[in-house]
Image (cartoon, coloured by chain):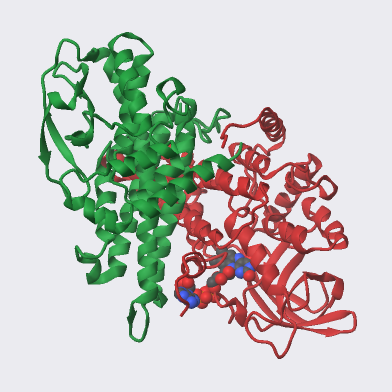
Chain colours: A red, B green
């Protein structure tokens, strides 16, 4: 065990820092849940890719730098330190990307990964359906084989960023007689295909951050099947493992929040004096962010050493989502009457972003599998409690 | 950057675990509670044979010259087994303190030369008085006690020259004492000024030791509840199949799992003498304590009334979790120490230096 960075890792950090300092937009981009903001974020992805920073841990041939996950974590630290824009293609690079590496054939990897890294293909995730939320095995959208195509009919919902995304990765039922986890398949579908209709849904903040996607006899070539026909559940669980266990929420994000929270506490001494528990809540958030970082380095070390991500990813998901919410609740309490102000309000000063963060943090225990479901998984698969 | 334990570290902890599973069973624990001393020389020698008691000591004192990072998993195991022996007091607090002092020669060197090899060989235990604790733990089995005089100076006194009064406490395995003694001409090890630094370092090592034990205790408390929940039936099914029970246990497991890497980091930081080691220890103690307390409360709730009895073993671990939480600095104290540092100056730069992933100035 050696928790120091190597010379090479330090040099990598410096390189990343310098590039980010020179290239991160001086002004925050508009929300990626608006048309203009989405376009601006896509441009940023293109720029990142030109610099070779889109996804540093990917092989060079797919647009990465071929470095390991520790360097990816270092990059993420520098990314948040620089205050760089959110990743509009996070479903692509953090979820589908690693899944393609594991289950895609060479052709699929060569076809989908480079444009993903370049921000040419921005991806959405199409798993949830109106009647298949937590119970994902209840998926009813069908994809039946017809020659060298599948024909898709049905509906997906809550698809983040699908309003302006280019592609969607979905789970469909390919075997009409199948039930539950069997007979599902993982497919890649362009959102401009004939028969696809995307209907935007306004989120809590009034912006169209997710969408419903309707499929009416959409023809998907068989080479856009990922993994085996009928093996979609297995592929999806691998994606979910990355989502919950490692990539979707890198620790740097929460360490940045924790630092901001400490600053907020310092700037609001009167609130902290009125309610002495606030200081304690801040330090708890700070400790958790640090613990999460250490845990992630540990997970990364394990994967580099040939290990994999298992059911412990459920513990991880519970931890980051609840930590994030607790930190934002603390921020709201510190802001007091200013907490309700939008960033555009003059009286909000520079603290208006907390509200946005707070509202989004509330979604954390819901998306990527609700925390109730994660507790079920942890209890049954990690602790071995009886099902039922 | 590598967050792996190496083969030797894993093998060492396996061997400690095997020994404890054989020689430190729940039956043995109960037998020891009933005895006046509550300790087993045989067990202590067994641990010494594995290298545990001399692990941190230099070879010249019969030790292995290894570090906290080599010890942490074994400490976790000692918590899992609810080991009553004074690992924290002797191996982490007192013996390394004495060894540090010995480097300066004088009385300390001869005291260390006499006693440390015996510690490493499992023939002696040591105790340390510390202002953080109202009593001296395991003073009755310590052949040599390191005691603080009223002027703050540190003295080495053999047990024959002290008078001990046992202070009853909640954990049936713990043995706490007040000590009456008089400084002698030849007992002085260090004056008050020289003692403070040594006590601070011993405090950090001991707090770390407790944190590591809390990981094992917390996990054991969860494991006991999981076992019980798989067997106990109500409403015609195992209570472990009820979601409320599952969720309680999953929540406790989250707490233990995320305290773990924090404790491991503290071990690394102590091992290399990192400037922030004390803060890393405080974070470890605060998080591991709270995880163990949550595991204790959860485990009791899952057991129901049977968990509230003397008969069932659960309380051994529960009471140890409570006791360790308050010794060598309570979790609130440690959180406060970290808060002082963090609020005094967090910069915006992830520090590139050793271990510290986020800068505290
Ligand atoms: C901001 C946001 C973005 C999202 N983005 C995407 C996306 O890009 N793609 C996508 O496919 N989906 C997305 N989702 C959907 C998300 O995956 C689902 O919301 C989630 O799986 C829960 O499903 P549901 O909303 O239908 O809730 P339900 O499944 O109806 O659950 C409602 C409540 O009941 C509880 N519950 C349900 N079953 C159980 C059980 N067995 N035990 C205990 N409690 C239970 C749940 O925990 C929850 O509290 C997104 C959601 C949000 C909020």
Identified at 64% across, 81% down, the residue is A139
Indicate the quadrant where residue B315 lies: bottom left
Which quarter of the rendered picture does the N terminus of chain A lie within?
top right
Farthest residue to the bottom: give it.
A177
Q: In the rendered image, which quarter is residue B26 located in?
A: bottom left
Percent x, y of residue A362? 47, 60
> Residue A43 at what x, y percent from top left?
76, 48
Relative depth, front residue between A220 and B192: B192
Decide if residue A345 is in sight here.
Answer: no
Q: Quadrant of ligand 1?
A: bottom right
Q: In the figure, residue A90 lies in which quadrant?
A: bottom right
What residue appears at the point 21 percent right and 28 percent down from the top-left corner?
A: B131
Residue occupying image coordinates x 33% and y 38%? B87
Specify whether B138 is left or right of B293.
left
In percent of width and height, residue A47 lies at 77, 43
Front residue of B140 and A9: B140
Pick the residue in front: A158 or B117: B117
- Compared to residue B245, the image places residue A155 above or below, namely below
Is residue B76 toward the left or the right of residue B37 in the image? right
Furthest residue toward right: A147
Residue A20 appears left or right of B352: right
Q: Is residue B181 above or below residue A88?
A: above
Image position, residue A168 (x, y; %) = 74, 67
| Residue A65 visible, this angle | yes
């Amino acid at each position: 065990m050696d928790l120091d960075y190597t010379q090479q890792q330090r040099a990598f950090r410096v390189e990343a820092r310098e590039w980010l300092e020179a290239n991160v937009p001086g002004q925050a981009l508009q929300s990626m849940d608006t048309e203009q903001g989405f376009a601006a974020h896509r441009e940023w992805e293109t720029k990142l890719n030109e610099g070779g920073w889109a996804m540093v841990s990917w092989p060079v041939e797919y647009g990465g730098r071929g470095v390991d996950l520790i360097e990816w974590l270092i990059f993420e630290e520098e990314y948040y330190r620089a205050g760089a824009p959110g990743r509009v293609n996070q479903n692509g690079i953090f979820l589908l990307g690693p899944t393609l590496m594991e289950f895609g054939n060479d052709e699929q990897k060569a076809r989908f990964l480079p444009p993903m890294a370049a921000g040419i293909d921005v991806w959405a995730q199409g798993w949830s359906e109106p009647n298949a939320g937590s119970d994902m095995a209840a998926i009813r959208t069908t994809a039946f084989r017809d020659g060298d195509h599948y024909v898709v009919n049905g509906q997906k919902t809550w698809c983040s960023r699908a309003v302006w995304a280019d592609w969607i990765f979905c789970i469909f039922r390919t075997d009409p007689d199948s039930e539950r986890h069997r007979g599902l398949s993982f497919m890649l579908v362009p959102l401009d295909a004939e028969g696809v209709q995307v209907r935007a849904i306004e989120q809590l903040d009034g912006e169209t951050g997710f969408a419903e996607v309707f499929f009416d006899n959409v023809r998907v070539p068989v080479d856009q099947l990922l993994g085996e026909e009928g093996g979609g559940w297995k592929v999806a669980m691998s994606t979910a493992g990355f989502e919950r266990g490692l990539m979707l929420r890198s620790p740097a994000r929460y360490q940045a929040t924790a630092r901001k929270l400490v600053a907020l506490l310092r700037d609001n001494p009167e609130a902290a004096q009125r309610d002495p528990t606030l200081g304690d809540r801040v330090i708890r958030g700070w400790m958790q962010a640090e613990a999460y970082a250490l845990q992630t380095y540990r997970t990364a070390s394990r994967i580099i050493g040939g290990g994999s991500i298992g059911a412990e990813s459920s513990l991880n998901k519970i931890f980051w989502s609840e930590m994030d919410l607790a930190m934002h609740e603390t921020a709201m309490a510190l802001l007091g009457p200013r907490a309700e102000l939008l960033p555009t309000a003059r009286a909000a000063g520079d603290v208006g972003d907390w509200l946005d963060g707070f509202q989004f943090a509330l979604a954390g225990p819901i998306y990527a599998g609700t925390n109730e479901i994660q507790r079920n998984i942890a209890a049954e698969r990690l602790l071995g409690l009886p099902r039922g | 950057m590598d967050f792996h334990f190496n083969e030797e570290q894993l093998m060492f902890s396996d061997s400690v675990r095997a020994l404890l599973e054989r020689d430190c069973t729940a039956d043995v624990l109960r037998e020891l509670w009933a005895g006046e001393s509550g300790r087993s020389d045989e067990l202590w020698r067994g641990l010494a044979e594995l290298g545990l008691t001399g692990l941190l000591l230099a070879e010249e004192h019969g030790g292995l010259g290894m570090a906290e990072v080599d010890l942490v998993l074994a400490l976790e195991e000692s918590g899992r087994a609810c080991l009553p022996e004074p690992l924290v007091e002797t191996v982490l607090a007192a013996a390394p303190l004495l060894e540090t002092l010995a480097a300066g020669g004088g009385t300390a060197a001869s005291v260390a030369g006499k006693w440390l090899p015996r510690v490493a060989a499992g023939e002696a235990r040591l105790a340390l008085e510390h202002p953080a604790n109202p009593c001296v733990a395991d003073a009755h089995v310590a052949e040599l006690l390191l005691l603080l005089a009223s002027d703050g100076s540190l003295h080495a006194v053999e047990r024959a020259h002290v008078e001990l009064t046992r202070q009853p406490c909640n954990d049936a395995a713990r043995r706490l004492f007040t000590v009456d003694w008089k400084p002698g001409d030849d007992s002085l090890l260090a004056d008050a000024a020289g003692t403070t630094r040594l006590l601070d370092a011993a405090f950090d090592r001991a707090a770390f030791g407790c944190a590591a034990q809390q990981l094992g205790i917390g996990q054991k408390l969860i494991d006991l509840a999981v076992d019980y929940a798989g067997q106990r039936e109500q409403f015609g099914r195992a209570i472990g199949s009820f979601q409320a029970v599952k969720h309680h246990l999953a929540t406790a497991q989250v707490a233990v799992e995320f305290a773990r890497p924090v404790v491991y980091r503290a071990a690394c930081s102590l091992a290399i003498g990192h400037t922030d080691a004390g803060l890393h220890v405080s974070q470890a103690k605060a998080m591991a304590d709270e995880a163990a307390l949550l595991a204790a409360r959860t485990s009791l709730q899952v057991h129901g009334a049977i968990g509230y009895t003397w008969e069932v073993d659960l309380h051994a671990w529960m009471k140890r979790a409570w006791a360790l939480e308050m010794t060598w600095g309570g979790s609130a104290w440690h959180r406060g120490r970290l808060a002082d540092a963090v609020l005094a100056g967090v910069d915006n730069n992830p520090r590139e230096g050793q271990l510290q992933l986020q800068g505290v100035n």
